[in-house]
Amino acid sequence: MLGKLLEYGERDKEIDTAVLSMIILVLTFIFIFSSGVLDENQPLENIIGSEYISDYNLAIFRTICAIICFFTLTWIVLDPKGAPDFPLYFKERKIGPRHRKGLTRLAAYTMWHFGLIGISFSFSAAASWMVISGIIVPNWILTISPILFFTSFTTAILVTCVVTFHIIGDAISRSQNVDHLFYWYEIVMHNLNVVILAIALIINNFEVDWRYFAFPIIFGIMYVTWARIYAKIEGVYIYDFMDPRLDGAPFIYSFLLLLQTMFFGIVALLDWLVVWNIGLGIVVISLGTYSITTIRKPI
């Protein structure tokens, strides 16, 4: 899919990629702090209420979603069988097999984003249970809850689309075994992620703010920084297209950040559609979710 962008040129592009990422990071932080988005919080009713279910049922739903996320990640770490993958070996600059067990399995973006989803549901669930218990919800929870939610949904769409439309097909084209991409927990992280967030989008009262687009960018740059640290520690890039030395690395990184911004726009549009017409919103969200998920191994 990425073709010549994944080739190495006469000169490594690691410095170019790092400088580009740093410039985007600094500009994004400047925007966040100058826009005042962190100084505002949504009304309590938006955070803990729903037009369609009771506050108590919303609290239960959020709690279950958080438990699913953290249970899945815990299982991945503790599973004695581990799982195979095909990372890019840093020194050799070649893709090869390995077998992972334990905490190192949490190094992938998939696990990062699923953890973010769990954190998002944890904070919103905490807000719900606080109100039910008669406890005052701190303003900072009212501020970060919608930010975490819309950032989570943006990253979830990115993960699902990359897995469905690139990783699976790319692995098959290289004659690699893709069975590990269809373990139950992989299906949960690559497919149930967008399902539970879509349901939450429909039943939540969160209001999207266009300024939230900056936070998925921050999250993305945090991960690519971690990917470089992980490559130094473990000697591999879990995703071959994230090697900053590639000839097309600056373009790939820019494209991924642009994708995240576009996906945020899609989430914002879906949020608006649900408010405008709940029936149409459910239909569009259902069809969109179905179109990007893959729960069966291609024949």
Image: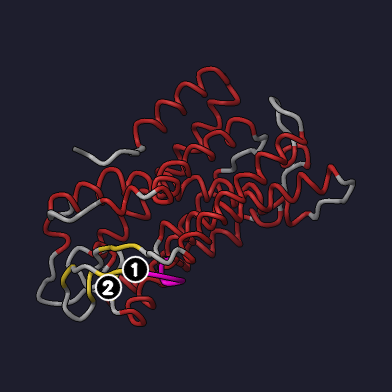
| Residue beneath disc 1 | 20
Judging depth in this view, the residue of 185 and 212 nearest the camera is: 185
Amino acid type for the residue under numbered disc 1 = Leu
Residue 89 % position (x, y): 22, 74
Amino acid type for the residue under numbered disc 2 = Asp
Residue 130 % position (x, y): 82, 49
Contact between marks 2 and 1 (CB within 8 A): the answer is: yes
Outermost residue toward the front in this view: 80
Tell me: residue 22, above or below residue 202. below
Q: Is residue 175 left or right of residue 79?
A: left
Determine whether the residue tagged by mark 1 lies in a helix, strand or loop. helix
Q: CA distance from mark 2 to mark 1?
A: 6 Å
| Residue beneath disc 2 | 16
Q: Residue at x 61, y 62 (%)?
A: 33
Residue segment shown in magenta: 100-105
Q: Residue at x 32, y 77 (%)?
A: 231
